[in-house]
Image (cartoon, rainbow, N blue to C red):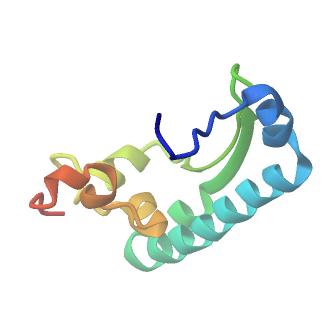
Amino acid sequence: MSSRPRIVFDERGLTEIMRHPKVRAALKAKAEEIAQRAKGIASAEIDDGFANEIRVSEETRPSGRPTAKVEATREDAADHEWGSTNTARRRVLGRAAGVTPQTVLPHRGDVPQ
């Protein structure tokens, strides 16, 4: 027999915890913080019109998990985020959130940004 304790996660209360107003407020506060950084980057590097099209949206997924996400809703937002033949890759949202290839794919630390 092992002398180490065995911990088993009980999911019964998880849905209620996820729906708690304080959890939702914390998600929204973090998204608003990222949105403000993104607006600053967009205003400095693209234009104020692009910055004005960055917003936070909240939803609850079918699993019951709440989300708050930062979106750039302008038509050319994907071009500015990822680059295109006519637009330089700026990664406004990714940089504002502190997302790098190393944070998403830690096993690929050699990937340039």
Give left or right: position of 28 versus 34: right
Residue 83 spot, x, y in % from top left: 24, 51
Residue in the picture at 44% in, 80% down = 44
Q: Nearer the viewer, residue 38 or 58?
A: 58
Residue found 25% across the figure and 54% down from its top: 106
Residue at x-position 30% and y-position 63%: 90
Nearest the camera: 97 or 50?
97
Name the outermost residue toward the front. 1
Instruction: State the image coordinates of residue 20 (x, y, percent, origin top left).
Output: 88, 45
Q: Quadrant of residue 26?
A: bottom right
Residue 52 place in picture, x, y as percent: 62, 63
Image height of 110 relative to 77, above or below: below
Name of the residue lying farthest toward the left: 110
State the quadrant of the C terminus: bottom left
The front one of 78 and 111 is 111
71 left or right of 21 in image: left
